[in-house]
Image: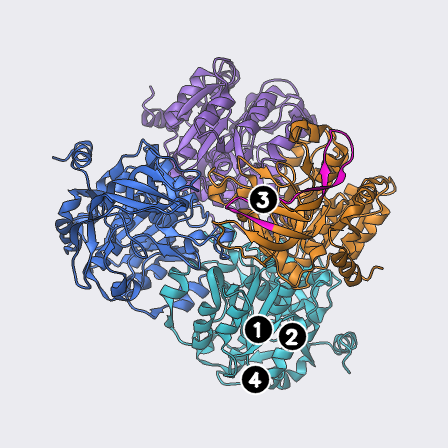
Chain colours: A purple, B orange, C cyan, D blue
Amino acid sequence: MAKMKAVVKTKPVQGAEYLDVDTPKITQDEVLVKVRATSICGTDVHIYKWDPWSQGRIGEKALPQILGHEVAGEVVEVGSTVKKIKVGDYVSAETHIPCKACIQCLTGQEHICANLKILGVDRDGAFAEYIAIPESVCWVNDRAIPPEFASNQEPLGNATYTVLGADYNVAGRTMAIIGDGPIALFAVGVARAVGVTKIFLVGKYDFNMEIGKKLGADHLLYANKDDVDRVKFVKDNTNGFGADIVLEMAGSPQALDEGFKMLRKGGRFSAFGIASESPTLIDYNNGIVFKGSQVHGINGRLMFDTWFRVRNLLASGRLDISPVVTHLYLLSEFAKAFEEMMARPRKSAKIVLFPDKKEYEEARRRRGMR
Amino acid sequence: MAKMKAVVKTKPVQGAEYLDVDTPKITQDEVLVKVRATSICGTDVHIYKWDPWSQGRIGEKALPQILGHEVAGEVVEVGSTVKKIKVGDYVSAETHIPCKACIQCLTGQEHICANLKILGVDRDGAFAEYIAIPESVCWVNDRAIPPEFASNQEPLGNATYTVLGADYNVAGRTMAIIGDGPIALFAVGVARAVGVTKIFLVGKYDFNMEIGKKLGADHLLYANKDDVDRVKFVKDNTNGFGADIVLEMAGSPQALDEGFKMLRKGGRFSAFGIASESPTLIDYNNGIVFKGSQVHGINGRLMFDTWFRVRNLLASGRLDISPVVTHLYLLSEFAKAFEEMMARPRKSAKIVLFPDKKEYEEARRRRGMR
Amino acid sequence: MAKMKAVVKTKPVQGAEYLDVDTPKITQDEVLVKVRATSICGTDVHIYKWDPWSQGRIGEKALPQILGHEVAGEVVEVGSTVKKIKVGDYVSAETHIPCKACIQCLTGQEHICANLKILGVDRDGAFAEYIAIPESVCWVNDRAIPPEFASNQEPLGNATYTVLGADYNVAGRTMAIIGDGPIALFAVGVARAVGVTKIFLVGKYDFNMEIGKKLGADHLLYANKDDVDRVKFVKDNTNGFGADIVLEMAGSPQALDEGFKMLRKGGRFSAFGIASESPTLIDYNNGIVFKGSQVHGINGRLMFDTWFRVRNLLASGRLDISPVVTHLYLLSEFAKAFEEMMARPRKSAKIVLFPDKKEYEEARRRRGMR
Amino acid sequence: MAKMKAVVKTKPVQGAEYLDVDTPKITQDEVLVKVRATSICGTDVHIYKWDPWSQGRIGEKALPQILGHEVAGEVVEVGSTVKKIKVGDYVSAETHIPCKACIQCLTGQEHICANLKILGVDRDGAFAEYIAIPESVCWVNDRAIPPEFASNQEPLGNATYTVLGADYNVAGRTMAIIGDGPIALFAVGVARAVGVTKIFLVGKYDFNMEIGKKLGADHLLYANKDDVDRVKFVKDNTNGFGADIVLEMAGSPQALDEGFKMLRKGGRFSAFGIASESPTLIDYNNGIVFKGSQVHGINGRLMFDTWFRVRNLLASGRLDISPVVTHLYLLSEFAKAFEEMMARPRKSAKIVLFPDKKEYEEARRRRGMR
């Protein structure tokens, strides 16, 4: 069997290795994808660091395992029962692999399937020359979207679902977005593209805040400075009512506390950030009950309603995510990329890796990098 | 000016007095209602006890003040600018008096108005022979609903809104209702009437649990007994998934913890109960974020969508709340009624008071009491 | 290969034959079901008669073909890639076979797939001892539901989706149901079970109207009698406003005209009935535009949200469809059953056929027939 | 009493007169507004022409009556019971005056009140120096919006409600807009601002189509040319599925026919255009029933949810309606303006009138006209 290059987690310590491994063999309902671009998610960083979450969620026994799950590539082989995907298709992958049998899967909530498996977490991932993907989570890309953006559709889908929720109409509304990680920045761009008319971005790092501004944030509020009363600022700029919608994408106690305070009565609170302390102390009475809030937990993206929206937003040019895609690297340079991801204060947002040098160079040219 | 009998909070200590006071004078946009029946809410008990909440919310300066806000009666006088209400109308009152100018009021959320005033809390209430009510919160009753039920439409509205939320379709779903106070019991009845197909009632008191059973609960789970693992029981009886909908109507740490655990992924959590500890510790990550839950804070009732539904449910006979209306008293017997309300273990659910002896006797006859 | 009995359309004329045919061979993603009960749909009658619709939709070239699509049975064999269904499962079938690749299939609307195939129309059906069913449309029944009811879940699903639509909250509302065919009668039962508080049933046949009354219709209005102004009657009984919801399930010009007139401003109109004249003359301006109506075309049932609701309604006993299931026959008696179905005035609602005599006798016993 | 200038319909023939009339006297719940800008609606043209609709809807007995209902101005006097509006407020008016007592008014659908009165149709309008407006329909403008745009908020509200409907999430969707009148052009702008990712505009007049292009239409399709198969074009550019949403804003038989054909299965059809032939022939079966369409009649705007969105879209600069506001005139030049409105092929979109010359000149300066 042919070999391929891959970034593999081999040992239960920080780091990963760039190795020659077997090219994946697909089962009858899978497709084999030649990876053109693959981007790094915060989850990959957790696994790279082998932090307590990774130790519990993945575990030493699962190793060695290939990292990564954000991907764009070409289908080079399809299993015998594959129907909708063809060799030559330009695809990306939904990361949530549903069982198709539970109540969630049978009622339009496959993204929170009772028996969810996750690409790059529960099976080998995309930091490689090839990846095997179940047809059920294969998504055919619009060729108008270049690979370095197409691989970002998965996290952009998180952002889009956090902004739009289950068909909540945000057009002509005000919104506070708390957090300045890459998905929060994507959320700013989506919010701007779908007609949110006032966007408050609460974050910490100049590098990211500047990106948020480029994507359309109207007001930047620093979470780590005390010059401004952030809650008061949001209220003062929303006729005293508070923001119609709050996206909590940070998870810190301060973010949760201020998020519920910034929300107007009867508003919507998208709970995307994982609370850093669990169980979590919140102002349940004032923030939810008395306020008549709608709080929506966000895990994944709608399969595949969100993907259609993301594709359309990117392919139409309505949404330009260029400012968020800050770095491109060769796959072999993964270690440098992870260093970049872990640096604080942040100096990067999304980093895309390319197994192939020619793809890498073309992408750099498209992005005006050299 | 004519005098009337009323139950008045005169001093900042437990209790109230049955006094002769001035009959209210109405302003141009109010109506004067001759009270036929008025029922006791938990809020009235808080004020009666003059507990810390009452001391902060109402305050000594507001006294003397007439208690009560659940009411049914006949309009005997209308202000000069009153348009839709006429003398002779048989009415009840929405308790939430909206400002009509804030964003909530102008977008269909008057019940959580930014400048909300509450009947019997921010102004004189209904434990009297007459009450002045702003036309804007006056609701014309269906004459098929007797006064002892009509006065209960306000708390029944809480229950109905908790069950149905903002147009969430509960028909053919499973539901766990946590709490066995009167509004939770009403919720059981509503859930049964609107096609919830499996109802788990979690409560403490035999007296109330039996009422819950009469109203349609399929499974009774005692919160204060350890013979059954309640979370496991709910899951075992919902194909392992958990309840589609959880109504949290108790507010205790145990209720909040179990409520989120009983909920299935992607389910809906109606947050009606006021948490007994504030700020509140909840399993935010597992209960909301990862689960993709929809949490909806419930405060009041939709004005007046919920009222239409409540009226139709009662007038059509689809919903029979008889088992919840456990006691009828003369208004003068208020002290006995409050004792009844405060007794633990509970021996009463809803208690209705009648200023007029003839009304009282007719109601007793209708209810088969003697 | 083993033979089985089946009701087969062999020639492009009215009628069908009871023949020995090959037992179906399943493909890898199908299951083989031993039919316990199968019920007759209006579509089967169209095909039986070989009317113009059948001639165009199915065509002579497709013959011979086995009729029928409403079914309940036991799985006796599963294909090699079948995952969720097991031998021994008690199942029914969703009739709409989706492609899983179009935008509808990928966004929760599989029931209106762009490339829909229909069981018993585009492939062999259920009027036989065995039927092959794609796993994707296989539904595991609750054993509390007997086969003569379980086979009716498919049309009951039509009714349920017509009543509930896409999460439209009908509880505590008024509803006019126009039509008295079996699915309209099911709709009456569902409406009653989910808390519709006033149900107007408009129909023609005493036999069916009586069933409608048993299922919970509050008012019977004859479409073929002029003693009552039906539109005025509905308005007079809804405070002059009109019905909150109208289910149009007849398709005649009169039904469409009166349906839109009976609807209140801002109400919802479920368009289930196929118009008998096409293109169709409607009062578009007054019935839809000025009224601000919500008109929803109903085709099939939500896959599988509606199935969950139907299962729960039946298994819980909240909904009893006994009065609609008027006749049980042996499969071999199919000709008599079709005569019964075609008789006018109607003397039957739903007719269930049993390939096996023992099943038939047990079902008769359960239904108290002899 | 002081006199003012006004454009008055005095006789039941085409035309109107510029007269000195009494300044309106307000009742206790009204405000008096000094008109800064007022724009011409198609309804005004109907009344100006005194066409059959005007003869039936308004009638000779109502004359003399002041025309116009789209307005922006300053409050100069308030009635004794007015609460939220103050002298000096910069306001516009919702045209639909609700009764506040019917089921629509009491459940969030005031815009389709059962007893609706319309400004400029059922009472004197805005083509004057002053207008009396009930407080209930008074809307406080954002000062960032100049009068010539603020008076357009009412028709822009129609467009916004047609695009967004009752909280239908259009972001990342495709949309066909049929019609090129001013409200259709506004709809293009709104659609673009709220993230519709592909907009097909079907119209007739070069002048208007060019405006549509400026506002963001991606594809222009001429309804009066046969070079392109419009339905096929829309399908070919939506992966063969058809548009997710169709806004029917023309009302011609061709528009209705093509509109339903362009719609994808399960899509949404906003019925804003008044059908030119009534009753109306539509392909009910294929366009609504089989397709599973959601058809929504649009009459007015949500009160006041749509107004908030419109205000936010304009004040934030997310939506620029400059290209639609093609002409500014002095109120005294009304006759020329009406000629302009009635010209075919169209050479104007929205025309704004100014009672005051200084306002007029400032507006021209702001718009870069001279």
Q: Are marks 4 and 3 in contact (CB under 8 Å)?
A: no
Label 4, label 3: how far apart the Cα atoms are: 70 Å
Please name the amino acid that badge 1 sits on.
Answer: Leu
User: Which is more foreground, mark 2 or mark 3?
Assistant: 3
Label 4, label 2: how far apart the Cα atoms are: 22 Å
Label 1, label 2: how far apart the Cα atoms are: 8 Å
Foreground of the two, D125 or C8 = D125
Q: Quadrant of the N terminus of chain B?
A: top right
Q: Which residue is mark 2?
A: C213
Please name the amino acid that badge 4 sits on.
Answer: Met
Q: Which residue is mark 3?
A: B25
Residue B310 lies in what quarter of the image?
bottom right
Q: Residues within 10 Å of mark 1 (few under 14, many from 20)?
A: many
Label 2, label 3: how far apart the Cα atoms are: 51 Å
- Helix, strand or loop at label 1? It is strand
Q: Are marks 4 and 3 on the same chain?
A: no
